[in-house]
Structures are given as structure tokens and as C-alpha cells.
Amino acid sequence: MEGIAIKVEDVSKIFRLPHEKSSSIKSSIVNFYKHKKGYELQEALSDITFEVKKGEFFGIVGRNGSGKSTLLKLLAGIYTPSKGAITVNGKLTPFIELGVGFNPELTGRENVYLNGALLGFNRKEMRAMYRDIVEFAELEKFMDQKLKNYSSGMQVRLAFSIAIRAQTDILLLDEVLAVGDISFQKKCYNYFGQLRSEGKTVVLVSHDMAAIEKYCTKAILMHQGKVLDGGAPKEIASKYRLINLEDNSHKTTSIPELFGDVSINKVTINEAEEVHVNNKSELKIDVELSVKKNKSAYIAISVFTTDGTHIAYFDTRGILKHEIKKGKSYRATCVFSSSQFLMGAYSIDVDIYDVDAIYLAKMSNAVRFSVRESSPSKAGLFNLDGTWTFKQSR
């Protein structure tokens, strides 16, 4: 185990899921003679094997239900394996459920000392680090309020600020920043960078592929309770995106919403509702509409990722003038290149506004497209369409 922080060997985890409740000895005996189990076995993890070296920033990725959180709870000792063995070399601190041990009836200040005691710090040590905890959480004005009056984001900030004081060799992080605001997440990711520079061993579960690619030195991809692949973070992130494309059908029904005197009749992308393209394809959006009353209007399309992040917007203001006439039908066409988008799945909303930016009509999730690349994807949300110049200055 020299040089190894965590070793997982052929680990499986099986849960018993009850179908009915046996509330008496009689019902248990009846079920026994009827050969009726009343439960089923679910294998959450199957034959998991990997190693995490000391000083490694190790990423675990996979879709919801792939077994990531179950695996982390096994590593933390919350669950025991049904089969196989897990060896941990060093003191391990799990950041799985931040805020466990918080008392909503106590103030933020009192909860700092309570949570610190759970981490093994005495009162003198907590007094010495109290100011740093509060400043990191950015909650100076709220420390004497009861915790039940905190938002979920404030509670996570406080819990994380306390937890990172733990003196440990190995950290387990399971999407602990999911409800933190963007500025706090950035501060925490800076902390991750510090951990990496200090050579700490970190196991990070995340759906944020940019974080996996930036901080991790190695990663594994989980799918349906098994380790599908392991290796360089960029390659694993790329395969994770491909699984998302293959598993996500995007068949949500598109229903036009009418707010004014314009109706959206039909929207297509390359003459279909959904297309799969490479990263060098042309995408053509056609919007067909009809008019009940003379209007001056403009049309907009918005592009979203599968998690609902709004990443792009195009409209016709300043490009076309459209005095649309009562009783007429129109088709508006927008063409752009898929090269601006990284590997992933996307949906498009279509909106029509009048000149005062008031809704006339809307169609959410009107069409969908996915972009596939043969090489590992770059990090981020989209490709920046720019140019470089490079020359010697002297």
C-alpha cells in the first residue's frame, strides 16, 4: 500500500428493496409458505476495482443513478460492501452531506463550535479559526441569527467553511457545491487548486466536466453500477458527454404559447425536429408563423444545454425589418455553424416579441440538436470564434 491512498478491489453493493411490509409473525409465515419473498435485490455496484494514489486528485463521473454516491459512501465507511474489500491508507474526511449535525434552533456561531467539536477540535482551536471560517463563508452579519433562518446556500457555505478546517489526509467531495452561488463556487474551486498544489489526496464526484478536466489528475467513468473506463480526465469527460448524448432522447413535447396576435405554426432544424451533427456542420432553423393583426415584431432563438443553462441568443433586431401583416404567413430562417458548440446536446427556444420587447408568442424546446466530436472535447460551454496574432516584440 506504499504510495496508495485508497484501494478498491472487486467491490459490489446489493440493497434489499421491500415490496410489502410484513407487520406480523403470521404474515411472515404465510409469505414463507407461499414462497413469496416480498422484496427484490438491487445491485447498485458490481465488481468495482481501482486505486487512488497519494497526492492524486481523482474524479468520479457518471449519470444520475450510475452508483457514484453509493461508491463514495462505501469509501467513507457509511456502507459496507456486499462483496470485495476497500483499504484506506490515512485519515479520511467525507464532505458528502454538509451540515450533518447542524441544529436549526442554534445560531450560526453556536453551530460553528458544535460542528467543530464533531470534527475533533476543542473550543480553544475553534476560537482561533472562527474568524477565518466566517470570512470564508461571507456570513459576518448573520452569525447570531438562528440557523433555521438561513437559506440552503448560506448553510452550505457555513458547513463547507467549517469542514475544510479538518486535518485530514484524504477528502471525499460529492457535489457539495450544488447549491452554492457562483461566486462562492469560484472561491471553493480556488481552494481545490490549493489542495492540488499541496499534494492532498482528493476524490471528487461531479457533473461539472470543466472542474474534472481542470483539477483532476485521473478519473473514472461509472455507468449502471460499473466502472466503464478510467484514465486522463479529458478523455473520461469526453466519454461522459457521449453517454449523455446516447441516453438522452430529448423527446419533450413542444407546445406553442400565444401571448398576442402572432402564432408559431412550426419550427424545424435542418427540416427535422432533432438532428445529430459533427462539429463542422451547418444548422438551419426555420420558423413558420401566421399573423392575426398588423405588427412590427422581431424573432429570437435561445440555445440551452440539457441542464437548462442558457448559452446563446440570436435575434433579428438590426438585421431585418419586418412589418408583418394581418392574414399573412411568414417563414424566418436562421443559419449558424455547429463549430461554435462543444460536444453535447442542446435545445432551442423560439420567441417572438413586439418592438417594446413584449411577448407575442413562444415555443420552448422547439427543436433539438447534438454535436459529436471524434477527439476529446475542450473545456467550457462553447468555442470562442476568434483569431490570434503572435509576433516577437523586440
Image (tube, rainbow, N blue to C red):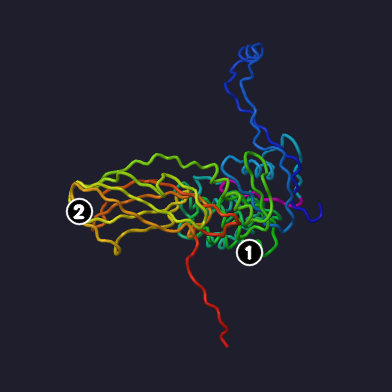
Mark in front: 2 vs 1: 2
Residue at which label 2 appears = 295
In-image side of 299 versus 23 (left or right) = left
Residue 90 is a magenta residue: yes
Position of residue 132 measured from the top left corner of the image (x, y, whole percent): 57, 63
SS assignment at label 1: helix
Q: Residue at x 48, y 60 (%)?
A: 340
Residue visible at 61% across and 43% down in the picture: 69
Q: Secondary structure at mark 2?
A: strand
Q: How many marks?
A: 2
Q: Nearer the viewer, residue 118 or 181?
A: 181
Magenta segment: 89-100
Residue nearest the observer in this picture, 147 or 228: 228
Residue 137 placed where, x, y %?
A: 52, 58
Viewer-proximal residue among 155 and 389 = 389
> Disc 2 to disc 1, how far (Cα)?
57 Å
Is residue 139 in sight in this rendering?
Answer: no
Mainly helix, strand or loop, the magenta region? loop
Q: What's the amino acid at mark 2?
A: Lys
Res 125 quadrant in image:
bottom right
Badge 2: residue crowd in 10 Å (few <14, some 14–19, many ≥20): some
| Residues at marks 2 and 1 touching, judged by CB atoms closer than 8 Å | no
Task: Identify the mark nearer the N-term, 2 or 1.
Answer: 1
Q: Furthest residue to the right?
A: 2
Which image quarter: residue 168? bottom right
How far across and down, in percent of the image, does residue 248 sit?
51, 42
Q: Residue at x 48, y 52 (%)?
A: 153
User: Looking at the image, which residue sits at the far bottom?
Assistant: 394
Crowd tier of the residue under label 1, counting other residues whose Cα lies within 10 Å: few below 14, some 14–19, many 20 or above:
few
- Residue 231 % position (x, y): 69, 53
* Marking on residue 194: 1
